Image (spheres, rainbow, N blue to C red):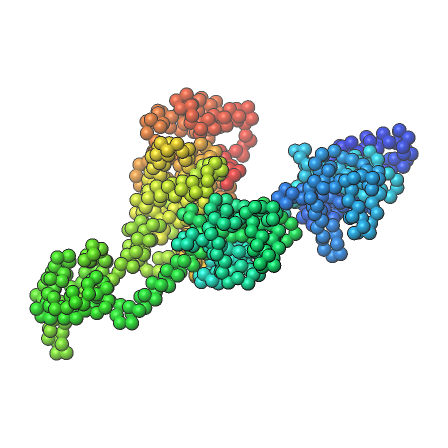
Amino acid sequence: MSGTSENLQRASSGPLVPQTLAAIFGGELPVADGLTEAIRRLSVLVEVADTVTQRLSLDHQLPRLIELIVEALDAERATLFLHDADAGELFSREAHGEGVAEIRIPQNVGIAGSIFGSGVSQIIDDAYRDPRFNAEVDRRTEFRTRSILCVALRNRADQIIGVTQVLNKRSGAFTAVDMALLEAISGHAASALEQAQMKERLEQARREELELLEITEAISTELHIDTLLTRIVAAATQLLDAERSTLFVYDPAKDELWSKVAEGAEQKQIRIPAAAGIAGAAFTSGDLLNIPDAYADPRFNPEIDRTSGFRTRNLLNVPVIDRTGERLGVVQVLNKRGGPFTQVDIRRLKAFSAGIAVALENARLFSDVLALKNYNENILKSLSNGVVTLDRQCVIVKVNEAAQRILGLSAEALVARSAQHAFGNLNAWITRSLDFIAQMGATDYHADTDLRLPDGGVASVNLTAAPFLDTAGNSIGYMLVLEDITREKRVRNTMARYVAKEVVDRLLASGDDVLQGSNLVATVLFSDIRRFSLMSETMTPRDTVSMLNEYFTEMVEVIFTRGGMLDKYMGDGLMAIFGAPVVGAADADNALYVANDMVRALGALNAKRAERGFEAIEMGIGLATGEVLAGSVGPTKRMEYTAIGGNVNLAARLESANKYYGTVVLLAATTVDELKSPAVLRRLDLIQAKGISQPTWVYESLGHHSPATFPKLAAVLATYEAGLDCYQRRDWQGGVAHFAEALDLSPQDRPSRIFWDRCRYYQTSPPDDRWDGIWIMQEK
């Protein structure tokens, strides 16, 4: 009942009732009829208010509101249009049988488009005399439009978000009272419709994201280049609801763009100069090209249409760029069904092009790996390890092909040569091993040893030297078995790009079990570049990628120096773990050292950037310690080792909280509790992070500061701590005094300013007895 009363109060607060009463006393309506009409229309507003408070979807709200509008204004038809900024259109939905049909018109066409543009409500008594009216719609629908009432739909910020249009009042002409009623209905419905539209957009974006993810995953699993190209063009065509797509791949040897698949065309292969046509322009410039009219663009070659019999109307071209900034090709989509390509199409194709780049890289890597596999298989037809046999005088008797390959010497250069002659100059350790087994009669093993080659290169081998025995067990010579582990070492070096060398060794020694899911106590580090979006808007894509590569190189190097594991890159941010997959003795300390060293490294990097005239990079870092679930996650063909859990989320929230406190490094109390070494910290605040169930004390790390960057640090910390104690005791006056003193010592200290403001506020507006000192963070 209270909700209805509130709706009634809101409904009666507009101009509707006064205008209706004015119509009564002005003689337009009999008193009894006028009061009845006012009550009826007021009840309509109440029903409108009740409808919009139900938070229904647009599919339910629009048809219901249209029914109410038709009933309220005693009209034959009504349409409620909302604005779609991405498409540049006005759209509405009407009940159609058991479903809902959508109507769309350009945002600047017709009477509705005119009212949307001007924002001025209007009554058109004769629709056919208005040049803006499109009579073709009447002929198509077999409906006769006589009069129109059209008003702008405004939100609470007085922004026009659509229009409401009513056709053919049954009982005469539309009046000012009708206009007031329609404006009142539209005003009451606007906010709810805007929220429903926003929710629908978010849901649509989520569906599109899932669809894009499914498509990207589908192509990422294909490793054969010919099949991959076919899948990509089919996926691009489906994704953008177009008629045809082509993926041009760059051939650097010939400086050409080629495609083995042009969907719907007969050509088996298309080759064009890398700078030719619209595709070439997009590739060479690295820019997205949206061509609404192909034949109006001088770069378009109509001869291709004449040859293929296909008519190109519009094109969308997006370069395919890998993570290093290298252009791999360009994806071209032709003829969007139902109109031109929109901003939504552009966003989707740009996102898909990133997946194409990954898929192409995977296919190329697979081709390389397949070639290496075939090569190794050919070697395994004889022996995978090199074998060298020697007689009792250490003269080489026999070498297999693998040994020749490993040693870098032909059989002619080895057979009948003494071990000293063959190995002594470059690899004296082999001759010493032979001397050892000759004297001791035992096997000698050398693991992961460098084998110097005649061409100056180095191979990594495991060498086993053993006596060569006859069937009676008598020594007849010696045998060397060389296992080439150069490839394994490459794997180690590759893994070392993600984790420290010591961690690599322990992982390889532990096998796969250590990568399975397990609960571990670890410290999670999140970092993120501040104002990255603003910075990237002023930079070219190549410069943006170059900046990120330079930044990440410095930051990851710091992480590895303390045994951290790089979990993932997240755009301009990264996540690192200390304590997984291998638990260390001082993971929390190492994480804090890394955070401080990252700030110092960024300072050095910014100094170099300043010399080159580039803008300084700013970042935030968050640390949290506790139990996480760490292990390999994902499908069997594409797994990723990562950590999940509440402490991972807390670290991310603290990284973001730096923006509020004006700090650089924040760490949770759980991390402070695990520290084994002294650290320069400030007990900052007791917060409840969004999405985190328990409040936590947050500390600021100041160990990266010097007297030059933070003068009077010790005095500020002491004064701040005293002020924080006053704050927790509700001693607002004492808190104001201490934080004011801290600001006198360091005017730029943002945390002192925040708490000074809080204490001053609570002096005049003290919290109730339930206040527990916890600050609720509203943002992630």
User: Which of the 4 image quarters holds residue 241?
Assistant: bottom right
Q: Residue at x 33, y 42 (%)?
A: 558
Of 133 and 587, the residue lying toward us: 133
User: Which of the 4 image quarters holds residue 609?
Assistant: top left
- Is residue 341 depicted above or below 375 in this figure? above
Q: Residue at x 73, y 37 (%)?
A: 115
Query: Where residue 157 sits in the image (x, y, percent)?
Result: 65, 33
Q: Say whether residue 117 is left or right of residue 747.
A: right
Of 739 and 87, the residue lying toward us: 87
Query: Where residue 584 sits in the image (x, y, percent)?
Result: 31, 49
Of 299 and 432, the residue lying toward us: 299
Q: Quadrant of the N terminus?
A: top right
Q: Residue at x 35, y 25 (%)?
A: 711
Of 588 and 430, the residue lying toward us: 430
Q: Say whether residue 211 is left or right of residue 493.
A: right
- Is residue 726 depicted above or below 513 in this figure? above
Q: Residue at x 51, y 37 (%)?
A: 777
The answer to whether residue 512 is visible is yes
User: Which of the 4 image quarters holds residue 303?
Assistant: bottom right
Query: Where residue 103 sits in the image (x, y, percent)?
Result: 71, 49
Q: How many marks?
A: 0
Query: Where residue 420 sits in the image (x, y, percent)?
Result: 10, 62
Q: Say whether residue 700 is left or right of residue 102.
A: left
The answer to whether residue 42 is visible is no
